[in-house]
Image (spheres, rainbow, N blue to C red):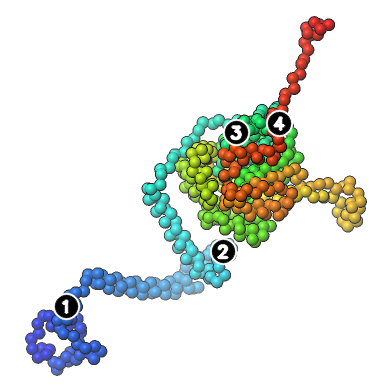
Amino acid sequence: MEEVSGGANTWREELASLVEGPAIRYGGEPIISPRRPLKSVGDRVEKFESESLKDQVTGFLKSWGEILLELGKGCKDILQQTVVAEDSFVVRKLGGHVSKVSGRLRFLNEFLPEDRDPVYAWPVVFFVFIIALSALNLNSSHGNLSPPMKDMRIHPPSASRILLPDGRHLAYREIGVPADRARFSLIAPHSFLSSRLAGIPGIKTSLLEEFGVRLVTYDLPGFGESDPHPGRNLNSSALDMLFLADAVGVNNKFWVLGYSSGSKHAWAALKYIPNRIAGAAMFAPMINPYESSMTREEMIRTWEEWLPRRRFMYFLARRFPKLLSPFYRRSFLSGKHGRIDKYLSLSLERKDEILIEGPMFEEFWQRDVEESVRQGSTKPFIEEAVLQVSNWGFGLADFQVRKECKRRGILPWLLSMYNQADCELAGFLGPIHIWQGMDDRVVPPSMTDYISRVLPAAVSHILPYEGHFSYFFFCDECHRQIFYTLFGSPQGPLVQKMELVETPSEAADMA
């Protein structure tokens, strides 16, 4: 065979011919493609030699990417034809169970936009959720720039305890004036992740004595040093408060104080033991975020203030409460201290941020949390979270004072208009005071707006520029204003009457 171009080619010319790839006839004449002009051999060889390693790797990766893409399409077709098909082995064995599970979880489709197909949307959501969890784990394991977390301490038992009728023990703490000299008794159930040590944070004993107030706080069942209560509810919570009042010598009516999520126990006392309650003081009162009587606007204004993690925790408490346990184990039950806004997924305004960063709040918070988690169980915290988002068994509108008549029917109703003997006032007859910070993003002002709408008799004290903690925690002037509002001018403790008892010898001397 003759050589191309009729002569012996050099190795550069042969290499250049392989790169360009011209067609060759056996007759010996090269057929040059008319698509582009033929460059000189030297130019073609120089271009080949100038190709960098980066370009070669890029071309290799692109080729592999195309191969993997085609492989994925092939695997998808195989799965659709052999696994997802209605007559496949997998569908015949698992189809019924999958249908039942999907039917129970169908309510989740309500959280998707209307223009999204659940079949395609939920796999994407699940994939993003897995990536988010991986990112959180990565950040937590590589957060070397954050200050080291302190270990929690378990302190020796120090609470006074009473024995309840059902055999449980309830731990409590009292400060202020003694029982026999108290003008006013104030009982305060604590909020989530708190204990009997909270009460009114930073309250001065001198202020309590000035107003003649006895402040009694207690650990909810399963918190601190109080025994757990299986199957507890808001009714049992009110009864615990009643038994505590009787046991510590509160013989007359007492005031109840509710702060944040602890307010639901105060509302329960107004519902189930109203005859023992003199009045209620509520501070940033938390209501059920799923309350059906809230308007759409109130609901939106409430939920938009919360972080996505906190919304998710409420969702779990309502639908899958058992899944809360690992979250609690990784946060406040981990044995390590942390910031309150991190543990409870709170978004705070500037005034609250300044307060929680101070050493006084940090010392109080750490000691209170240590007492709250003393028993190391997730059950009381899950119970408290479920109570918050469940049906309370009553509505706040029930406390509105109204007239109820026992007679039924049209004729008895007409007669009751002239005869009031069978009619009586219903609702809570005592005063209800509510303090609400306008910069509170933990319990948004929209919740107090809802309470004012359904319970217009409640007196709302609006606090501009105050947050969730800034007015209630470590504020002497705020505490004095609160007591003035509730109890009027300070009169001090009750004066004990000194009874003079004559002895026989004294009577003889007088004779």
Q: Which residue is mark 2?
A: 111
For the residue marked with disc 3, what is the amino acid? Lys
**Quarter of the image holding residue 109?**
bottom right
Whether residue 332 is visible, yes or no, is no
Kindly give the residue lying farthest to the bottom in the view shown: 27
Mark 2 secondary-structure assignment: helix
- Name the spot of residue 488 as percent of width and height, x first: 71, 37
Mark 3 and mark 1 lie on one chain; the one further toward the N terminus is 1
**Whole-number angstrom distance, CA of label 2 to CA of label 1:** 62 Å
Q: Are marks 2 and 3 in contact (CB under 8 Å)?
A: no
Mark 1 secondary-structure assignment: helix
Mark in the foreground, 4 or 3: 4
**Whole-number angstrom distance, CA of label 2 to CA of label 3:** 48 Å
**Whole-number angstrom distance, CA of label 4 to CA of label 2:** 56 Å
Q: Nearer the viewer, residue 244 or 376?
A: 244
Crowdedness of circle 2 by 10 Å Cα count: few (<14), some, many (20+)? few
Q: Which residue is mark 1?
A: 46
Mark 4 and mark 1 lie on one chain; the one further toward the N terminus is 1
| Residue at screen point 65% across, 46% down | 435
Mark 4 and mark 3 lie on one chain; the one further toward the N terminus is 3
Mark 3 secondary-structure assignment: loop
Q: Which residue is mark 3?
A: 204
Mark 2 and mark 3 lie on one chain; the one further toward the N terminus is 2
For the residue marked with disc 1, what is the amino acid? Glu
Is residue 440 rendered to the left or right of residue 418? left
Q: Which residue is mark 4?
A: 491
Crowdedness of circle 4 by 10 Å Cα count: few (<14), some, many (20+)? few
For the residue marked with disc 2, what is the amino acid? Phe
| Residue at screen point 76% across, 16% down | 500
| Residue at screen point 60% across, 35% down | 203
Tell me the quadrant of the picture where the C terminus can be found.
top right
For the residue marked with disc 4, what is the amino acid? Gln
